[in-house]
Amino acid sequence: MTFQERQFTTWHALTTFWEQPQAVTCYNPSLSVVSRWIGRQLAWKRSPWLAVQTRCYQAHHLLQGCPVACHYPRRVPPFQTYAWWLGWRIECVLALEQHTLDLTVVVDELARAVQVPLVKAPRSVLKAMVLALIGALQHQQVIRWQGTQVHQIRPITWFGTEQQKERAIRAKEKD
C-alpha cells in the first residue's frame, strides 16, 4: 500500500485541499492487488491483520475471502489508512452476522476509535462511511435496514479461496 502525507500550515489550506479532491492524484490499487497484499501481510505475520484473521477464523471465514462489499468505498477520509478502514468494515460484517447492528451505536464506536482533531464535524463524515458499507450490503440484498437497525436477512458472501474472490473482483471491476 502507498500513501501520501501532506502538511498544512493553516486551517484554510487544509479545507481548500479537502474541497478540491480532483487536484489530488491518488493511487487506488485494484482490489486484486489489495487482496494479494492482505495475503502477504498474513504470511509475514503482520499485525493488526492477525487479530482480524483470528476473529474471521472464529466465524469460520478466511480474512482473504472477506466480502467484496468490505472494499467499498475505495476512497476513504484521511483519518486512517485504507487498511484500517478495510479491517473496520470486516469487523462490522462479522458483528452483523452475530446480531442486529444499531447504526447510532456503530457511529458512536467509530467516533471513539478515530481521532480527528482538526475536523469541525467528523461525525457526519464517519456516518457517511457507515452508510456506505450499509448501502453496499443493502445493494447485495443481504440486509434489511429499518430506522437505525440493520438486520442480516441472507448470508453475506465470503469466499473460500483467493481464486474465488479474484473472479468476483474481476466481475465487480467490470461493472
Image (tube, helix red, strand yellow):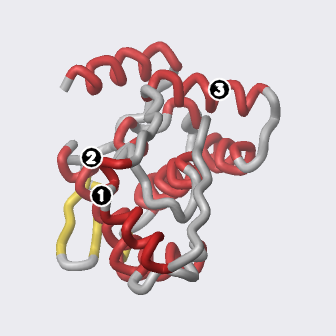
Camera-near label (2 vs 1) is: 1
Q: Residues within 10 Å of mark 3 (few under 14, many from 20)?
A: some
Q: Residues within 10 Å of mark 2 (few under 14, many from 20)?
A: few
Asked if residue 100 is positioned above or below residue 123 in the image, the reply reads above
Asked if residue 79 is positioned above or below residue 116 in the image, the reply reads above
Q: Amino acid at mark 2?
A: Arg
First in residue order: circle 2 vs circle 1: 1
Camera-near label (3 vs 2) is: 3
Q: Residues within 10 Å of mark 1 (few under 14, many from 20)?
A: some
Residue 27's spot in the image, x, y percent? 47, 34
Q: Residue at x 51, y 73 (%)?
A: 110
Residue 39 disc label: 3
* Pointer 1 residue: 132
Residue 100, quarter of the rendered image: bottom left
How many angstroms separate mark 1 from mark 3 (CA)?
25 Å
First in residue order: circle 1 vs circle 3: 3
Circle 2 sits in a helix, a strand or a loop, which is it? loop
Q: Amino acid at mark 1?
A: Ala
Residue 67 horizontal side relative to residue 117, left or right: left
Residue 18 horizontal side relative to residue 64, left or right: left
Circle 3 sits in a helix, a strand or a loop, which is it? helix
Q: Residue at x 27, y 46 (%)?
A: 154
Asked if residue 48 is positioned above or below residue 123 in the image, the reply reads above
First in residue order: circle 3 vs circle 2: 3
Nearest the eye: 40 or 52: 40
Q: Amino acid at mark 3?
A: Gly
* Pointer 2 residue: 154
Nearest the eye: 170 or 18: 18
How many angstroms separate mark 3 from mark 2 (CA)?
27 Å
Residue 103's spot in the image, x, y percent? 34, 75
Residue 19, quarter of the rendered image: bottom left
Q: Residue at x 27, y 50 (%)?
A: 137
